[in-house]
Amino acid sequence: MLKFNELKQIESVNGALKLRNQIEGIVDRIYSEGFDHIFYMGIGGTYASSMQAVTYITGKSALPVYVENASEYLTTGNRKLTNKSIVIISSVTGSTEEMVRAVSQVKELGARIIGFIDVKEAPLAKSVDYLISYPANEQLKFFMVADRLMFNNGDFSQYEQYYKELDAHLAKALVEVEKAADSFGEQFAQKHKDDSMHYFVGAGNQWGAVYSYAMCYWEEQHWLRSKSIHSSEFFHGTFEVIDRDTAVTLFIGEDEQRPLSERVANFLPRICSRYTIIDTKDYALEGISEEYRGRISHLVLHAVTQRIDAHVEKINCHPMEIRRYYRQLDY
Amino acid sequence: MLKFNELKQIESVNGALKLRNQIEGIVDRIYSEGFDHIFYMGIGGTYASSMQAVTYITGKSALPVYVENASEYLTTGNRKLTNKSIVIISSVTGSTEEMVRAVSQVKELGARIIGFIDVKEAPLAKSVDYLISYPANEQLKFFMVADRLMFNNGDFSQYEQYYKELDAHLAKALVEVEKAADSFGEQFAQKHKDDSMHYFVGAGNQWGAVYSYAMCYWEEQHWLRSKSIHSSEFFHGTFEVIDRDTAVTLFIGEDEQRPLSERVANFLPRICSRYTIIDTKDYALEGISEEYRGRISHLVLHAVTQRIDAHVEKINCHPMEIRRYYRQLDY
């Protein structure tokens, strides 16, 4: 399999899960100190992950949690973000300009900042109050904070049981998804490698992932045109430009918003012959209880799209690392 | 001028502004009763207008105001929406399925609902606590509620002066924008009538309008493919697929997020030759003070895009009323 190292991927996920002790210590302390609001702040891909975490929490808890876009914060501001707030961020490089500036303002304000910064020495790493430095697995790390916040808030009584299952089975379950999805990924890549436009549709804790998949993967890394649209909004405009030959991929997860995507799944075949449905339900996830599957739908989706990406990259002879403009120019 | 009736349009805007007494009565009463959160709830075009109102308030006030998508509310729920909340909605037909169901749940919960429903007899009109029935001008109506809320909250001391200017000058200023933009609108329509894809970029209180313009106008009413992208997110993916011949239109407003769009304006000419910049600053708005211009940028944008729409409709021989699927099929 292309770009697939089973052992390394299992270690990567298990290593992220092992951050739990550290995350619990930080979250328990901050929670007991009290807070007014919680913000997941990001831009681009990290904004997308923030949307996922916030949708996830909103479905299960009354915690006052919000998404904040770093650039919007720098201009519009947000008077709800105070010295009593908690801000959660993530950055691979720790040098994204908008994030560095926004987080520095947040720090000055006195809010407590939890930062997952892969590069320990980066500017962002110096601004955060609680630094956790471990590569990749951004969504998993964001959701671990979310879960512990909800546990403290009395919204997740099965927390220990859930993580017992993840510790024992998640890493293996995800590589098994990749194996099961690989030939599909290759066929999909062959079929769609030349698309002039591709529509990606999804909802729930996957919506941020769909937004990011269209923008941060197809546009940014494959240089292929794509548009993401929320399953609920699909019926309020976008579907009018879908016809027989339009490439549409629908992601269906297993969380509360599943019915919104099922509605698209029922409708799509009537107007389009070039659609694909990727349903997390089709993947086994050995060892994960039925009731918990919706909580990790976004990770299953990511495992499937990794297989698509590996094949698109090879077939299109377009290394995913290259950029036309991003960090190539001043802007 | 196509589809332009100066007198009728002036009367339409002035009629909406005359709702102010009624709006003030409702908002003052609700504000004095107290509340926990304020939600602008919508779907599709009304979700877009909700985003605009919430961005507008967030830049000026600490009021606990949020956007809620009706479909997401029906599935994920929102535990912050309680019997102490205020919910603001708008609907032309008053029969949009998701809104009817969501608002009925909100009513059952006991939240107070302010509804702008054009059709007085519609199902939605029966669910709201405070019904205001006046056609069109959705964004203006939403912003009038926002302004009165902020006035009550001590965030808008120039409220009376501002509305004195709007009452005297807004309607005329907006028809003057349309007149000034008409020949531009025709040229734009000629140039872009066959676009295989068109990117619309914007920020601030215009972002919802840009989202809606791409989805509810180009996709839904012109059957032309388009993607909206926030000016801040443009640099985190989408710009990688923009090249010399890509059609890109940037909307620049005059509110707090103007710098985010100016950044796009500075960058775009380096990578693209087929871009258009529509800057609200280029329109006179006689009688409106400089300091208030940013508050109505979205209305200026709408006046300009109305001219584009009138010409696209004629040139493409595609009446804007027709739909392929929307309300033509069960789904």
Image (spheres, coloured by chain):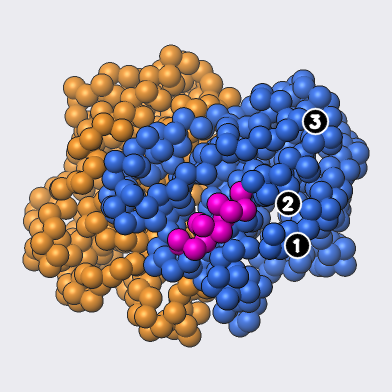
Chain colours: A blue, B orange
In the shown orientation, is residue B28 left or right of residue A65? left
Q: Is residue A185 magenta?
A: yes
What residue is shown at x 43% (from left), y 19% (from top)?
B105
In which chain is the residue bearing label 2?
A: A
Mark 2–mark 1 contact, CB under 8 Å?
yes
Relative side of B208 to B194, left or right: right
As helix, strand or loop, the secondary structure at mark 2 comes to helix
Q: Which circle, 1 or 3, is nearer the viewer?
A: 3
Q: Which mark is residue A92?
A: 1
Identify the mark at residue A211; answer none if there is no mark. none
The residue marked by circle 1 belongs to what chain? A
- What is the quadrant of the N terminus of chain A in the image? bottom right
Indicate the position of residue B132 as horizontal and vertical percent values: 26, 29
> Are tags 1 and 3 found on a single chain?
yes
Q: Residues within 10 Å of mark 3 (few under 14, many from 20)?
A: some
Q: Between marks 1 and 3, how big is the CA–CA gap? A: 27 Å
Sequence order check, earlier mark of 1 and 3? 1
- Residues rendered magenta in the picture: A181-192
Q: Alpha carbon of mark 2 to alpha carbon of mark 1: how far?
A: 9 Å
Residue annotated with mark 2: A138
Look at the numbered disc 1 and give the secondary structure of its residue.
Answer: loop
Q: Which mark is residue A165?
A: 3
